[in-house]
Image (cartoon, coloured by chain):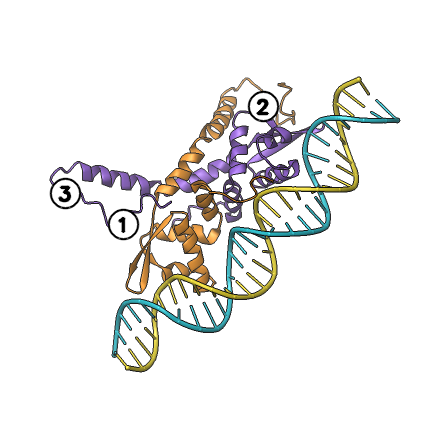
Chain colours: A orange, B purple, C cyan, D yellow
Amino acid sequence: MVEHMHIAGSRLDHVFHALADPTRRAMLQSLASGERTVSELAEPFAMSLAGASKHIKSLEAAGLVTRDIRGRQHLCRLQPDRLAEAHEWLSFYERFWTERLDALDALLRQPDREIVPSSEPKGDDR
Amino acid sequence: MVEHMHIAGSRLDHVFHALADPTRRAMLQSLASGERTVSELAEPFAMSLAGASKHIKSLEAAGLVTRDIRGRQHLCRLQPDRLAEAHEWLSFYERFWTERLDALDALLRQPDREIVPSSEPKGDDR
DNA sequence: GTGATTGTCAACCGAATGGTTGAGAATTGG
DNA sequence: CCAATTCTCAACCATTCGGTTGACAATCAC
């Protein structure tokens, strides 16, 4: 096989992977209220400090969090740019769910058309 | 307490995990143009059909894709609702990047204040 | 019916992930 | 200086992940 290696994961790879964990999402939520030290971020979770530190490192690697070392404490702060990128990526698909809502809306606005929950299979639109 | 994610956590887990892979994101992009069979979805990638099939299954498990079995072909289509959920989750953080833009904007509107590039040159971290 | 097409499934493999523990570095406080 | 606090690092472990191959079920085309 030509390329069996995992080359140059994109930024979105890291961001979405970081977001795919409830602990890390909760840490982001905590950071939404302001700066937090590593211990403060770790405190709500039933895991070792080293474990939480790994999560923070992965948030940092994804560019979602920056760290400010002040003496022996590491102050973490939310870095929203990469979240904005992910948000923007998802926005591309916005038309699909708004279209769907619009279609439902249009359907409901036609009182003369009988709305049947019939299991008509996707229509023979082919 | 914001509790902006009363959407069952595991759902976001699966959605973000599914999005954290470039193959799966490309498949979604392909599905944005319309229905695709499994082979059509697999064709652009240098991997076995079974490999691509696994990716599609994970998209399906995340609720991002639905399947319509038509004879021997499986027609896949985009299912946008879970994408909308992820988009909405990210929207909670929108104020952080808009605030930042507003702050930059305000700063640039003050010609008497000297603008110094703040401490760390972390713009290009790769 | 025969044979090709379409796709899944199971087993397997190496690498990454999420967690632990223990050791140690660096800073702070008395 | 000594002791406590804060945090990282390395090693380890079980599980998951992304990929392969080979076998097989189902459907279509002839």
Which residue type does callout 1 highlight?
Glu
Q: Residue furthest front?
A: A2
The label nearer to you, 1 versus 3, is: 1
Point out which mark residue B114 bears: 3
Would you place residue D13 above or below residue B88 in this image?
below
Query: Disc 3 sits on a residue from what chain?
Result: B
Callouts 3 and 2 on one subunit: no
- SS class, disc 2: loop
Point out which mark residue B120 bears: 1
Spatial CA span between label 2 and label 1:
61 Å
* Residue ID at (30%, 39%): B98
Spatial CA span between label 3 and label 2:
65 Å
The label nearer to you, 3 versus 2, is: 3
Q: Earlier in the sequence, mark 1 or mark 3?
A: 3
B70 to the left or right of D17: right
- Where is residue B97? Give x, y as percent: 32, 41
Identify which residue, A63 or A2, lies in the foreground. A2
Which residue type does callout 3 highlight?
Glu
Which residue type does callout 2 highlight?
Ile
Task: Determine whether label 2 and label 1 are within 8 Å by CB.
Answer: no
Point out which mark residue B79 bears: none
- Where is residue A85? Give x, y as percent: 39, 38
- SS class, disc 1: loop
User: How many other residues sit within 10 Å of disc 1, few (<14), some (14-19) or many (≥20)?
Assistant: few
* Residue ID at (43%, 35%): A89
User: How many other residues sit within 10 Å of disc 3, few (<14), some (14-19) or many (≥20)?
Assistant: few
Task: Determine whether label 1 and label 3 are within 8 Å by CB.
Answer: no
Point out which mark residue A115 bears: 2
Callouts 2 and 1 on one subunit: no
Observer able to see residue B1: no
- Where is residue A69? Give x, y as percent: 30, 59
Query: Disc 1 sits on a residue from what chain?
Result: B
